Every structure is written in C-alpha cells, then in structure tokens.
Amino acid sequence: MTEDPNTWEAATRLIRGGLARSPHGETAEALYLTQSFVYDSAEQADARFAGESPGFIYGRYGNPTVKMFEDRLALLEGAEACRATASGMAAVQLALMGLVRAGDHVVSGKALFGSCRWILKNWLPRFGVETTLVQGPDITAWRAAVRPNTKVFFLETPANPLLEVCDIAAICDIAREIGARVVVDNVFATPIFQSPLTLGADIVVYSATKHIDGQGRVLGGAILGETALIDESYKDPMRHTGPTLSAFNAWVLLKGLETLDLRVRRQSQTAAVIADVLSGHAKVRQVRYPGRTDHPQHGIAARQMSGGGSLVALDLGSREAAFRFLNALEIVDISNNLGDAKSMATHPTTTTHRSMTEEERLEIGLTPGWVRISVGLEGPGDLTRDLTRALDAA
C-alpha cells in the first residue's frame, strides 16, 4: 500500500482509518458478535496466550470490530494506541487507577463532571490515593499543589459544566518537571477541535457516548496515548477487570466517527450564533462560550482549540428562572446528555453536579441559575426562536 494513513486529512481518517475487511469484502465494517475464538492447533492457542502470535483470544481481551474502532480513533487523535471501554466513566476510572497506587497523589482541576469528582474524592482515597483540587486556569495553583508523591495531573478542558478552559501545555510543563503523567478529558472539545497529545498530555480520555456516537444510541469510552504507556498501565487491568466495550457498540461508534467532523463543525457554528443571541438577551446574566472574546480564558481557548465547540452555558440568576426557561422549551430537550444531534439543555445543579455539595459547586462558580446547552443539528433559526421564547418565559 502506497498510502500512509498518518498523512490523511481528518475527514479521510474518520472514514477509512482502521478498516479491516473480512474475506467477504463487505463495504460497511463487519460486526463480530462472538464471545471467544478458535485456534488451528493447541500450539497456536499456546502462542496467542503467550503473546507470541497475533490474533484474538476472548471477547473481554479484544474483538475485531472493537479493534477497528480503536485503530480509527487512534489515527484521528494522532495516538499510538487506543483502548476502548464500556463507557466514558469506565475510561476515566481506568485512566486514573492505572497510573497510581497506594501512597500516590493526584492534582486535578476543581471544575469536573460530578462523577469524575466523585472518583477523586470518594473512590481513590479508599485505595490510599489522595487528591488536591485546584482552580484549573491558575497555573501557579498547579505548581503549588505538587508534592513529592504527585504522580498524575487530571483536567477537563473545556470543563463541565461552565466551560472553564485550562492551559494544557503549561500544565504539562509542570508535570514533566516532576515526572508526573497528565490525563486530559477532551470530551467537550472533541478530537476535531483540540489535540491534547500534541500539547504534551500523556493520556487522553473520551466518553464516546457523546459526540463520537452523537445520536443517542450507545455508551462507550476510550483511553489513548503511547503504546508503551497504554500497555504498561492498562493492558492487564482491562483484561482482568472487564470494562469491555461491546462489539455492537463499537460498530455503532465506528459509524458515528464517519460523520463526526461534519456534525461537530456544524454544531459549533450554530453554538457560536446561539451564544451571541443569548448574550444579548435581557434575562441572561452571563454566557460562557470558549469562542467568544468575553470568555474568561478566551486567549487560551484560541491558542489550543480550533473551534468553540457545541456547548454553551448561561446564567439566569436563580433556580426558579432556570426551571421556567427549561420548561418553556419546545424544540430543545431537557436531558443531561450532550454532543447529540438533538439539542439538549440541563440544570447542572440538580442533575450532573447534584452529588457535589453546595460549597463545592460554589468553588467552581456553579450557582443555581446556570443552564448548560448542548447544541445539536437543528436549524439555527428554529433553535434561536425556541431559546428566545423560553428566555422570555424565564
């Protein structure tokens, strides 16, 4: 083959990357619904289990459809390796647990999805791992939080739910000085608009449930990085604990990847229009969108992101106003999901970040008036009309 997939444009990688046709020559990727695999001989089985011969062993260890998804996403991300998981939170949990052991220390941005914060605050301490939470955009805070036993920096950028942006390159510089690994949750930016590995990150995680599927069908997650680090930190835990992505879900996600570039760019264009409209409405106290110059970290976003993304946050001042707004929506759905073809809005205080205490929410600026909107693929005029009408009701 004269074509080098690593030289392809992103759109081509999303269609052709990782494609491995069976002898039948199918056009669409094959769906391998099987638990286990057979061997030509006992010697071949011995060699495969010893890692001396390539091939699949068991559905929990790998599957041809899952591998196509992993290879395609790795090619898009510019990563050497990818390991797919059953959900985004399985990816986050494994990404962290694979890099630490009892006595280690993690530094993380405070602005996180509620379940991510729960892992750091409630789960890792059970195994002797402590976490210090810092204000993500404050680089001096990351440096000040470092301890002799700090092994991992973890951050979301843009962060859930108020789209706080962290300087990935600057944080990675600090981590390299102390020999720590950097794990970046890149869900909001997607691999279309941000490439954490090129900025110095060691591991990138995704909830493939979001933009990668993008049509509300299946759950999935992914961990990406250098082959040596992926194998050392995650190969055995994945084999023995079983956070396995199903072959069917992998097949659906493969089809989602084919249109990811088109969908995310269109959603981002519409989100930028909506952010401008919302910012001019009298009922809105504040709008957060990384593509706007009034975003607190717009300079960082402009430097490390090539697009503003599909998420917009707005502050309506009170829970009551937020609820009136949500209940008046006729096109946009009330849902805690994001990245979908259908536009969705949620009240983070009572949904995605409900597990946090009020004090913890206030630390990241999450007051009861905030609403997070995931912009879909509907017509921009229809969405603008629906949101404006709902704001009038608020």
Image (cartoon, rainbow, N blue to C red):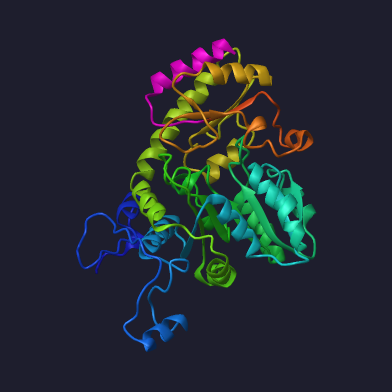
Placement of 116 over or under 8, stated as above or below: above
Instruction: Give whichever of 141, 50 is nearer the camera.
Output: 50
Give the image location of residue 244, x and y in percent: 49, 60
Is residue 127 one of those drawn in magenta? no
Give the image location of residue 238, x and y in percent: 54, 66
Quarter of the rendering containing residue 112:
top right
Point 67% across, 56% down: residue: 153
Give the image location of residue 43, x and y in percent: 38, 89
Q: In which quarter of the image is the C terminus?
A: top right
Point 40% across, 55% down: residue: 250
For this view, does 43 lie left or right of residue 28? right
Chief secondary structure of the magenta portion: helix
Magenta residues (range): 374-394
For this view, does 282 lie left or right of residue 226? right
Point 60% across, 31% down: residue: 295
Residue at the extreme left of the image, as rendered: 24
For this view, does 333 lie left or right of residue 106? left
Residue 332 visible in the picture: yes
Q: In which quarter of the image is the N terminus?
A: bottom left
